[in-house]
Amino acid sequence: MILFPFWHRNESLEWAANLPEAPFFEVLTEQIVSLSFRPIAQFIAWGSFKLFGISPIPVELLNFFIFLLSLFIFVKYSANRALTSLIILLLTTLYFSVFYYNFHLHGIFYSPILLLISLSTIPNINYKVFFAFGIVISLIHPLGFLILLSYLINRYILSQSVLISKLKFLLLSVFALVLFKVFFLPPIEINLAAYKDNIITAFNSAELNGFLKPISLLFVFSILFNSRNDFHSFPKYFTAVLSIVIVYSFSLPGLLILIAVSLYTAYNEKDFISIGNIIVSTLFVMYVESGAATKTAPLLFSLVPVLSRKNFTLALLEKYINRFSVTLFSISIITLAILIHLNINIPVVSNLVSPLKIEREKTVQLKEILNWYQNSTYIDYYLKLEKDPVSKVGLNINTDRKTIPPTFQIYLDSYLNKCSEKKKINNQTKELIISFGIKEPLNKNILYKTYQPTAQWAVVQLNN
């Protein structure tokens, strides 16, 4: 309600430029857009563009539906539905910066990954069914291959059946690994410093640069003190205090401690499926050079089974949960979302949500600018962004995100080459400059300007 709908952002512009005109066979067999090879993702976007034009809204709605399906599966097959629902509500509400990108076309398609993680938690799911889902989802996003491989290996290890059954699991695992290596795995360069930087930046973004660090630690404590007897356990108190000291002394995200405690707990519970999902999701955050909070979405989903198992601390909240309280809470959340969408200032909340609103509003401004440009007399001018986005800026509330463009120059060029009426950029000696986050557009060279309440002015001006 707050952020729907986004227009195209980052490489999504390249999807809109290249996919609509691509032949059907090419869509399924070639990497048409920047990113890894994702044939089914390309097919979904291609079909949407063919049916509804280059609007990303149909794919946004599809991603949202798949996300809801993932939540439904988590709750339906949980041993404690009320507690699992509560944990999912807390994770998706508190770490909202992680999940908001799941719903718009950004070349990502994380929602199917979340669906695969939720399917892996179904007790005694037929491995053939899971394998089929895994292959399909892997062709939407390659992280699916690693989750599938982790699941099959765990089922192979845990299988107590005869050798021939173990052999089936082993062969399927090898098959999934070979597919991933041949078609999807880029060359790996070991860079431990970069891996550390990727994890710290992404986790800090997920915690809104420290604002949610206490929340992560509270989840840690809820796992440590998972029964009445634990409240008298000195080692648990020592671990809790040590976690606080480590996180704040070394300025580390609390999610790091939450991962460590979750892995230890899952190991004690012999929950190797959750261990595999957590490790694979963490490796994904580590390897992908982005620093975006949304990269941690699969990881947070992987923590749900661990947090919901015998969690005495969070279970204490259950006695306060009834139909009236749930209805009241839902009405409060919906009212809050409507007020924020109407740009009514709410202390603290509006400040936290503002980076997300800025990102959405800038995509709207970019759409309006491109519509103006393609129908203007300046179509033979080169349209240039004043600056390129800076990677790893996260969602820092202290960063002036208003001035950061919603896409890169290479994607803008690709879009204009394919989608402008003249089908090419005619003259790069004459330039128009796009600037975002302008407080007062007073420059006399301004040709076009568009305003959004949070992102302020975006302007197009002659480059003299």
Image (cartoon, rainbow, N blue to C red):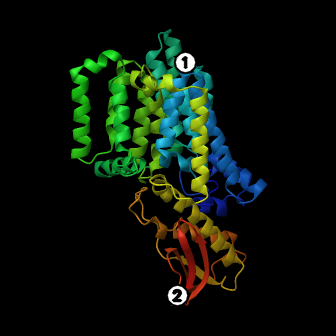
Q: Which mark is residue 443?
A: 2
| Residue pictured at 50% horizontal, 55% vertical | 346
Residue 247 x, y percent position in the rendering? 26, 42
Q: Is residue 186 in view from this perspective?
A: no
Residue 348 x, y percent position in the rendering? 44, 53
Side of 182 relative to 222 (left or right): right
Residue 377 x, y percent position in the rendering? 69, 86
Q: Earlier in the sequence, mark 2 or mark 1?
A: 1
- Looking at the picture, which amino acid does disc 2 mark? Asn
Q: Toward the viewer: 153 or 315? A: 315
Which one is in front in this view, the residue at disc 2 or the one at disc 1?
A: 2
| Residue pictured at 33% horizontal, 41% vertical | 254
Query: Image quarter for residue 331?
Result: top right
| Residue pictured at 51% horizontal, 33% vertical | 88
Q: Toward the viewer: 157 or 269? A: 269
Label 1 element class: loop
- Looking at the picture, which amino acid does disc 1 mark? Pro
| Residue pictured at 56% horizontal, 59% vertical | 344
Residue 438 x, y percent position in the rendering? 50, 76
Q: Toward the viewer: 235 or 77? A: 235
Query: Image quarter for residue 53?
Result: bottom right
In this view, 166 is above or below 381: above
Side of 24 relative to 456 (left or right): right
Side of 212 relative to 349 (left or right): left
Which residue corresponds to mark 1? Answer: 123
Label 2 element class: loop
In this view, 16 is above or below 236: below
